Every structure is written in structure tokens, then in C-alpha cells.
Image (cartoon, helix red, strand yellow):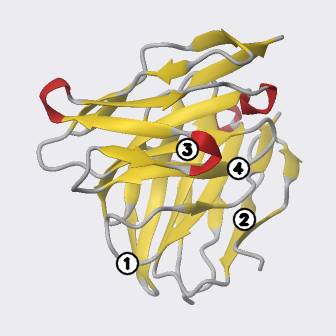
Amino acid sequence: NAGVTQTPKFQVLKTGQSMTLQCAQDMNHEYMSWYRQDPGMGLRLIHYSVGAGITDQGEVPNGYNVSRSTTEDFPLRLLSAAPSQTSVYFCASSQTGDNQPQHFGDGTRLSIL
Amino acid sequence: AQSVTQPDIHITVSEGASLELRCNYSYGATPYLFWYVQSPGQGLQLLLKYFSGDTLVQGIKGFEAEFKRSQSSFNLRKPSVHWSDAAEYFCAVGSGYSTLTFGKGTMLLVSP
């Protein structure tokens, strides 16, 4: 039972490089979201999707793009990486409904030099 | 806008002692409330959730939490802490469309 799978687990980039963080879930969940976790800040919502073809911005969307072409996949793109984007990124998915718990991946640890 | 406050950044508890982690929320409607735990280098695991009904909710690993509307609180408790409970704990409130607003977390340290 894979759940939510994030790849890669670790990545180091140089400033200005682009990258896509992958997220896949096998639970047929409609809702998917991306969070970033920084020390002392908790987790903050970057983007979310309520279904294939539908995405919206969260609290900290600047510098990130998303798309949702399938129910299973929700990639997060950094078009031009900046040191401020050094963080741990978590993808989550859930069934439809605000009272449904989120299922989290194990995270991607990203460093921008 | 909704918000979650976890007043304690760090808490140290002796093994076998009781634990209470504080959480206060701000939300206009009836909140959906969650507690998650994160072990080092891991993702977040759901401990328990509150939607409606009984204000005392039971979770996994022997944890429970009590929803108090008058105090806008959702404190997490455990009667006897084990060394394996050392982790970071996050309180969160549902923000709509199944997204979450998190508190900044409380790091639990367990002393022998």
C-alpha cells in the first residue's frame, strides 16, 4: 500500500535552476496539496487541487507552479530556484470533504545554493 | 482568517509522566481540528481528529484531545509518556477544500 509517494527525497540545486518535485497517490483521492515546512514556521500551504484540471493558490504560492492532469499526480515546479525556497516539501492527499484527514508523503528535502 | 497557536515551542517530560500539549485556534465556523505527529526525517502521521459530537476524542498511541469551544482550545493529552513519543506535534484546523492551517509545532523531549 504505497499511499502518497514523493520523489526525489533529497535534492540540491543552484540558484536559477528549475526543478519538478513529483507527487503521486494511489488512493483515488480528489484533493491534493503541497506544503512547505520551515523551522519554527510549521507547514504552510503552497498550492492545492480539488480534482484533475483544477488548481488554486495557498498561502505561499510565489515561485511555484502546479498542474493536475490526472487524479494520481500533482507535480510542483520551481521555475527559477532561489535560496529562500530551501525547505522540506510535503505533498498530501485526501478524500473529498473538509473533514477528511490528509495523508502525507515522506517529504522532499530541497537545498538551493 | 483561520489561525492556530501552539504556545510551547519545546516541552520536556519525564518518561511515565503525563503530557498536555496546548493548542488554540481561531476560526469563524465550527472547526475541523487535527493533531499530527512528526518523527525526525518523517512525514506527518494523524493522531486524532475532531469534527463534531463528543468533545473528548481518542486517537492512536494512547493520545486523546478535548475540544473546548468556550476557550477555542484543542489540547492533546497522554496519561503516561513513553520515550518513543519524542517527536514534533502539530495542531491544525481545516481551512476549506481539505487544506489545513497548521500551528508552528511543539517539540516533545522525553527524559529518562
Separation (CA) of disc 4 from disc 3: 10 Å
Mark 3: secondary structure: strand
Q: Nearer the viewer, residue A22 or B13?
A: B13
Q: Nearer the viewer, residue B82 or A48?
A: B82
* Label at residue A20: 2
Separation (CA) of disc 3 from disc 1: 20 Å
Q: Is residue A4 left or right of residue B42?
A: left
Which callout, 4 or 3, points to the residue nearer the camera? 3
Q: Nearer the viewer, residue A33 or A13?
A: A33
Q: Which residue is mark 4?
A: B43
Q: Is residue A21 left or right of residue A64?
A: right
Separation (CA) of disc 4 from disc 2: 19 Å
What's the chain of the residue with tag 2?
A: A
Mark 1: secondary structure: loop
Mark 1: which amino acid?
Thr
Q: Which residue is mark 3?
A: B36
Identify the residue at horizontal 84%, vertical 46% (top origin). A13
Mark 4: which amino acid?
Gly
Q: Is residue A61 visible?
A: no
**Callouts 3 and 1 in the same chain:** no
Among numbered discs 4 and 3, the one appearing first in the sequence = 3
Which callout, 4 or 2, points to the residue nearer the camera? 4
x%, y% of residue B71? 18, 24
What's the chain of the residue with tag 4?
A: B
x%, y% of residue B31? 23, 48
